[in-house]
Amino acid sequence: MSGHSKWHNIKLRKGKADAQRGARFTKLSKEIILAAKSGSPDPDANYRLKMAVEKAREQNMPQENIKRAITRGSGASGEREIEEIRYEGYGPHGIAVILDAATDNRNRTAGELRFLFSKHGGTLGETGSVGWMFEPVGVLEIEVEGREEDALTEAVLVDGVIDLEYDDPIALVYTQPTRLSIAREALVAARIKVTSLYLGMRAKTKVTLEGAQLREALEFLDALDEHEDAQRLFGNLDLSEAALEALA
């Protein structure tokens, strides 16, 4: 969503992002499983897997957990398969959301998400119900490392990049979907630290909320983001700095 990096960084500063160790490890494990499933089980030959493993190590996940997740992703563990599923719907006050989830039980996940949508005054829809309001993009999460917005904007204007969403310590670089890997290579060559990359969705138009309505929308987004099967969340809520500061 517009302002997604600001929302993410506020959660980090408040210690809300994956606050529980077990929940954090579960999400990290699923990302490793999906990365290993999508390509080679060798991190050196699978960049998505390499980044997932590096992120897990930064979060102090035990090496045994990492190995187990890679084995499961490669299909050698005999455990139930983890699959990626996209859910779409409307949250409170008409905000549109797309949630990419990873689950080994799609019926359970769908039921739990339907309950969360309903609890917060929203509706879980069918595939395509809100997807038409978004466009596919490549997304690179990068570390700002003290750079001012103008300097960082100039540094990330490489082949394939279409926009920068600036915030500190993590900023988002949006690319053309087919140029994601090329843009990553150019940013790494420019000595910009890329902490994650993925294909995502970006809203074509945005919804602005204030006061109690914004608070209710953020509570809903938090509830979705904190679900154990949630991997990535996209929405059309415009999180302006002024509106967020008013809630602080």
Image: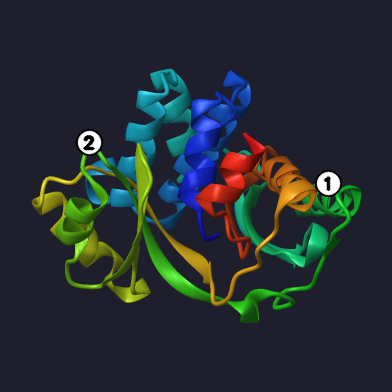
Q: Of callouts 1 and 2, which one flags the residue occurring earlier in the amino acid sequence?
A: 1
State how far apart marks 1 and 2 are (Cα): 40 Å
Q: Is 232 or 151 nearer to us in this picture?
A: 151
Quadrant placement of the N terminus: bottom right
* Image disc number at residue 112: 1
Q: Mark 2 points at which residue?
A: 146
Disc 2 crowd, CA 10 A, few/some/many (<14, 14-19, 20+): few
Q: Position of residue 199 (x, y in %)?
A: 44, 63
- Residue 144 lies in what quarter of the image? top left
User: Which residue is at a point 9% across and 52% down the rendered structure image?
Assistant: 189
User: Which residue is at a point 22% across and 42% down the rendered structure image?
Assistant: 193
Q: Is 68 or 14 nearer to us in this picture?
A: 14
Closer to us: mark 1 or mark 2?
A: 2
Quadrant placement of the C terminus: top right
Q: Can residue 202 be seen in this view?
A: yes
User: Which residue is at a point 48% across and 63% down the rendered structure image?
Assistant: 200
Q: Position of residue 30 (x, y in %)?
A: 54, 40
Please, what secondary structure does the residue beneath circle 1 have? Answer: helix
Q: Is residue 231 visible?
A: no
**Left or right for 248, reference 111:** left
Q: Where is residue 187 in the image (x, y as percent from the top left)?
A: 17, 55
Q: Which amino acid does label 1 sit on?
A: Glu
Disc 1 crowd, CA 10 A, few/some/many (<14, 14-19, 20+): some
- Residue 89 lies in what quarter of the image? bottom right
**Left or right for 38, reference 4:** left
